[in-house]
Amino acid sequence: MAFVDELNLHAKAGKGGDGVVRWRHEKGREFGGPSGGNGGRGGDVYAVAIRDTGVLSKYRHKPIFAAPNGRDGKNQNLVGRAGEDLDMKLPIGSKVTNLKTEQIFLLEEEGQRELLLHGGRGGRGNASFQTSINRSPEQWRPGDVGEEAEFHIELELIADIGLIGLPSAGKSSMLNALTRADVKTAAYHFTTLEPNLGVCFDYVLVDIPGLIEGASQGKGLGHKFLRHIKRTRMLAHLVSLENEDPLAAYKLIRKELEQYNPELLKKKEIIILTKTDIDEGEKALSEALSALSGLKKIVLSVTLYDDDSIKQMRDALLEEIPGEIQKEEDSV
């Protein structure tokens, strides 16, 4: 099933139940007074944050989320049963925008529950209209219609490490090597068209599809990909030794990050030189290390055809995860 990180959903809260006209039946008095109860309220609609990042793909063909209506009132002044509230389950990291009111809800923690739409109030039964003057009211009121709106859902993945770089830098292969992910890879650009997730020793890694020059202006679905980088805790910037100028390749991506959102440049970043197994790999690696030395960044290297190389790179990478993450892990 294709990964979905953005879509529109239509939601509708429940209608309130109608009030009813009823009469007390007492011995010797056929109409002993009004006893029609009020209707129950309609169900509300909530957004609830869950960990399933793929849940949006299940909603692509769901036309509407509708909370149940309230029940009509009953005899003996009994209020109708309220409609059950509807929980619309969305991934952690979702930005939910009510396109009618422009109100925005951010789902940042598992279990977070935000009220999106109010259900309609129940209508009034004839018992509620009784007065000293009107002792046998025939009036009743229908329940109110629940709120209804279109919502735009935009997911910004929350991960510990974001793998970034030019197309064919080896990000998907890296994710496969470090986690149990089974991401499609091939020897051509843009094999990855959607972000992919994997877990390595309880740390979440996300493979951001290859960025290109102009991504910050939306070229090559740049905005779609760049927004996921905003919520990652650390960046692993992959630079392939197949690039004739590794420093220029590195700077191109950094420029796109800055133009999209300068705050992205403040994230901790590790550079990983990939494909060290190419012809004259040792020479290319030495030249790349020299060219990148002025950046004052941690630079790792790896060939995905060598398990020892992968393990050494993995251990070094995980050691660089920002301290607050390791504190969180220690507290579990």
Image (cartoon, rainbow, N blue to C red):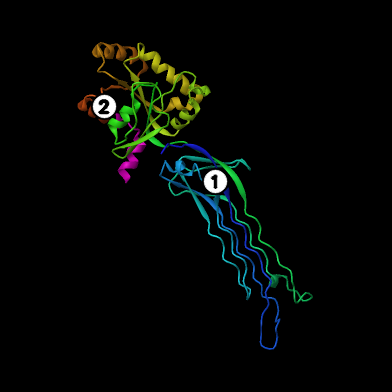
- Residue 68 appearing in the image: yes
Q: From mark 1 to mark 2, how far is it between C-alphas?
A: 46 Å
**How far from the left and from the top, in percent, is residue 254?**
43, 20
- Residues 84 and 285: in front is 84
**What's the amino acid at mark 1?**
Pro
Instruction: Tell me the tag on residue 53.
Output: none
**How far from the left and from the top, in percent, is residue 193?**
42, 29
In the structure shown, which secondary structural element does the residue marked by tag 2 occupy?
A: helix
Q: Are marks 1 and 2 in contact (CB under 8 Å)?
A: no
**How far from the left and from the top, in percent, is residue 151?**
57, 42
The image quarter in which residue 248 lies: top left
Residue 170 is covered by the magenta coloring: no
Vertical comparison of 96 with 223: above or below: below
Which residue of the protein is positioned furthest toward the bottom in this rendering? 28
- Assign the N terminus to one quadrant of the image: top left
**What's the amino acid at mark 2?**
Met
- Is 309 placed left or right of 210 in the picture? left
Residue 330 is covered by the magenta coloring: yes
Identify the residue at image location x=32%, y=42%.
Answer: 329
**How far from the left and from the top, in percent, is residue 20?**
67, 69
Category of crowding for the residue at label 2, using alpha-carbon neighbours closer than 10 angstroms: few (below 14), some (14–19), many (at least 20): some
Identify the residue at image location x=59%, y=61%.
Answer: 70
Instruction: Tell me the tag on residue 313.
Output: 2
Q: Magenta stretch: give its range.
A: 316-332
Dominant secondary-structure state across the stretch colored magenta: helix
The image quarter in which residue 265 lies: top left
Mark 1 and mark 2 lie on one chain; the one further toward the N terminus is 1
Report the mark closest to the observer, 1 or 2: 1
Q: Which residue is under mark 1? A: 63
- Is 52 placed left or right of 199 in the picture? right
- Is 76 placed left or right of 233 in the picture? right
